[in-house]
Image (spheres, coloured by chain):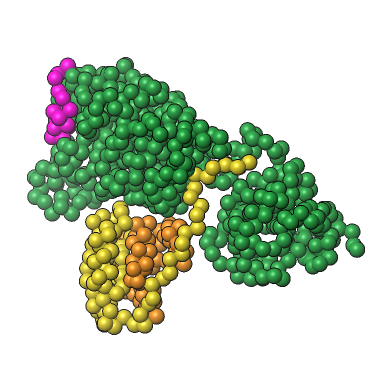
């Protein structure tokens, strides 16, 4: 027998040892397909190649125990020989397999003459001289087990998460069964909150918990994440439209009630910015459910032309203590001592500076006119929600003047009006195009489109307003947070 | 290392294409307007051309382009139509 | 586009051949959406992008150009 370079012997799934030299003696060239069971692309490769006939010179090397390798073969319908390689994966290392799946075309001397990394339909069709079909035609692979030291907690595990696409671009916390179980806190993992559009992946509590772990949530935050997902799946929110539009639209979460203090949600200084785990990770967890379970990946089913940074995460608490108005959840019919999330669809927030207004009329005009240019300075009126975040100093001015929310909304609505003639600049609705020149046109179709919450630090006169989502027929949704299982 | 996947990896049951008729003549085509601007004009032209090929047509519109069609719209098409042209998605 | 592909899959399930017309930049999205819904071979009928600023004549011309494609998707 000709000496085979890098010869090896590994157990097949039925336990019998098999050597590379023996395989090559039976037929060459031979394709060795390296895979492991935690790699979705490896599963895809095995399923696609399962259709190859008896004569195909293909052997799978699974970086798994024989039992797991056998299960892998059964699950994918792969009936060609499967060898099992245990840690420390000496064979994979010797062949420098960094990614799975990797296919190596090996000649009779054991030399590698061709390599295919990841799934690539065209390359595999060429290797085997058959048509394989199916979608996707290409998919990246995952980190091979043999590449790095085995064990949790290393950088390679974080790279693995990113390779699998279980991320929004930032590092995530690997969703181990232990972490997910701790997050579930005794809840039924199989209970589904419903299908998440646009791909209609089922939002089982287990998957929602996996997203919460990935996002970096503490287990205590999970009930808030669940309430947020429930809100997103309400038909009136229209998660589908928001997910696939070319608009920048993203979900905005406002938390009310005792949960804020219990979980350390920030409603004060920097409430819309970074720095607070609960705000950042709860907002992120919701986005991961929509992106991963729901399939709304930017660049794929999420077609936002630009998107905006708030699509990473947008969750804050209302500063009920600094507000003289009823909090948002009370306004929406919930008890003051209930903890709730309110989900609103919106574009990027605009900062509104007003340091000099002395009267409520002046300040109302500043706030409203700042929003006038959002979406478009000319496409008026808009039948969509503008969510204003009023800072404590601004809120105090209205309180001192005795203005309740209704009065403020009405003043803001009335302040922003222009004659139709001034709005005919190209981006103009047909109704305004056809209207009489002097017809007054408001920014919003009604004062009800103006939503108000209070948040921010004690000092500084900067409020903000989230841009409206045009034509998405989306309504804000409030859900009570359920603490018990 | 095993992880809990956030992705629903179940293979979707394949959906077969509906059987196609041999020709258009005598068939009823629903022209489903997704209600984005300019769509109606586009469908007007398609409708005229379909008439030239001997098809009957009827117009139906979605409530909004930003959601899948309501069950009522799907039902109506299924009851009244043989074929559908849906547009215009931009 | 995604919503239209959802509609098409539901209609095809009901036995109604459906042709969705969309502009070219949405082809990938339509393909991906069709795949996740179980119709990986479903294809939309494409016309050039953009349409919002086209004249009526231009729109009609695009409709004429794709009519044969529409017919080929719905019949035979």
**Residue A479, percent across and down?**
30, 36
In this view, B12 is above or below A418: below
User: What main secondary structure does the magenta stretch of the protein show?
Assistant: helix
**Residue B20, percent across and down?**
37, 77
Which of A250 and B71 lies nearest the eye of the viewer? B71
Tell me where residue C66 sits by quadrant. Answer: bottom left
- The shade of chain C is orange
Which of C46 and A70 lies nearest the eye of the viewer? A70
Left or right: where A407 falls relative to A232? left
- Residue at screen point 21% across, 20% down: A324
- The shade of chain A is green
Residue C68 visible within the image: no
**Residue A83, percent across and down?**
74, 55
- Residue at screen point 38% across, 44% down: A193
**Quadrant that contains the C terminus of chain A:** top left
> Is residue A273 found inside the magenta-colored segment of the image?
no
> Is residue A408 found inside the magenta-colored segment of the image?
yes
Left or right: where C9 falls relative to A50? left
In this view, A468 is above or below A270: below
User: Chain letter for yellow?
Assistant: B
Which of A345 and A40 lies nearest the eye of the viewer? A40
**Quadrant that contains the N terminus of chain A:** bottom right
> In this picture, which residue range is highlighted in magenta?
A400-414
**Residue A396, percent across and down?**
22, 18
Tell me where residue A25 sits by quadrant. Answer: bottom right
- Residue at screen point 36% across, 37% down: A228
- Residue at screen point 27% across, 46% down: A236
Number of marks in picture: 0
């Amino acid at each position: 027998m000709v000496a085979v370079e890098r010869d090896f012997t590994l157990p097949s799934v039925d336990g019998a040892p098999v050597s590379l030299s023996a395989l090559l003696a039976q037929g060459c060239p031979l394709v060795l397909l390296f895979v492991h069971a935690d790699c979705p692309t490896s599963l895809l490769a095995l399923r696609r190649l399962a259709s190859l006939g008896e004569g195909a010179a293909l052997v799978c090397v699974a970086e798994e125990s024989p039992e797991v390798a056998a299960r892998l073969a059964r699950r994918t319908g792969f009936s060609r020989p499967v060898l099992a390689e245990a840690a420390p994966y000496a064979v994979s290392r010797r062949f420098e397999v960094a990614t799975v799946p990797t296919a190596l075309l090996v000649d009779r001397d054991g030399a590698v003459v061709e390599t295919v990394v990841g799934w690539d339909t065209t390359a595999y069709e060429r290797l085997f001289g058959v048509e394989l079909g199916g979608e996707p035609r290409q998919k990246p692979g995952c980190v091979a087990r043999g590449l790095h030291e085995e064990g949790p907690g290393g950088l390679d595990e974080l790279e693995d998460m990113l390779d699998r696409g279980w991320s929004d671009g930032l590092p995530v916390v690997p969703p181990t069964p232990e972490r997910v179980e701790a997050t579930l806190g005794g809840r039924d993992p199989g209970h589904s909150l419903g299908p998440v559009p646009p791909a209609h992946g089922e939002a089982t509590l287990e998957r929602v918990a996996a997203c919460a772990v990935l996002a970096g949530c503490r287990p205590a935050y999970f009930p808030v994440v669940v309430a947020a997902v429930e809100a997103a799946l309400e038909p009136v929110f229209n998660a589908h439209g928001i997910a696939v539009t070319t608009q920048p639209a993203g979900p905005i979460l406002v938390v009310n009630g005792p949960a804020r203090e219990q979980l350390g949600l920030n409603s004060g200084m920097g409430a819309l910015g970074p720095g607070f785990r609960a705000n950042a990770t709860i907002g992120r967890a919701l986005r991961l459910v929509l992106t991963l379970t729901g399939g709304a990946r930017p660049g794929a089913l999420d077609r936002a032309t630009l998107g905006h940074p708030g699509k990473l995460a947008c969750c804050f608490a209302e500063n009920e203590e600094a507000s003289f108005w009823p909090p948002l959840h009370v306004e929406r019919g919930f008890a003051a001592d209930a903890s709730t999330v309110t989900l609103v669809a919106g574009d990027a927030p605009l900062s509104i500076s007003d340091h000099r207004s002395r009267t409520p009329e002046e300040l109302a005009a500043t706030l409203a006119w700042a929003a006038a240019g959002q979406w478009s300075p000319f496409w008026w009126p808009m039948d969509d929600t503008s969510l204003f975040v009023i800072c404590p100093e601004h809120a105090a001015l209205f309180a001192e003047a005795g203005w309740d929310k209704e009065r403020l909304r009405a003043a803001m609505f009335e302040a922003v009006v222009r004659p139709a003639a001034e709005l005919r600049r190209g981006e103009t609705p047909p109704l305004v195009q056809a209207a009489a020149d002097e017809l007054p046109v408001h920014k919003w179709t009604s004062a009800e489109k103006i939503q108000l919450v209070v948040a921010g630090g004690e000092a500084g006169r900067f409020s903000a307003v989230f841009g409206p989502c045009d034509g998405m027929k989306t309504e804000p949704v409030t859900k009570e947070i359920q603490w018990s299982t | 290392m095993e992880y809990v996947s956030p992705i629903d990896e179940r293979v979707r049951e394949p959906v077969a294409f509906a059987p196609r008729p041999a020709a258009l003549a005598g068939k009823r085509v629903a022209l489903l307007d997704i209600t984005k601007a300019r769509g109606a004009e586009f469908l007007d032209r398609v409708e005229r051309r379909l008439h030239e090929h001997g098809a009957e047509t009827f117009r139906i519109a979605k409530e909004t382009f930003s959601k899948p069609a309501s069950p009522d719209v799907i039902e109506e098409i299924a009851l009244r139509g043989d074929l559908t042209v849906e547009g215009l998605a931009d | 586009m995604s919503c239209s592909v959802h509609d098409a899959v539901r209609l095809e399930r009901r036995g109604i051949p459906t042709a969705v017309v969309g502009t070219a930049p949405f082809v990938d999205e339509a393909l991906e959406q069709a795949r996740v819904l179980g119709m990986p071979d479903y294809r939309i009928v494409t016309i050039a992008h953009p349409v919002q600023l086209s004249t009526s004549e231009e729109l009609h011309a695009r409709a004429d150009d794709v009519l044969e494609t529409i017919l080929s998707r719905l019949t035979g």
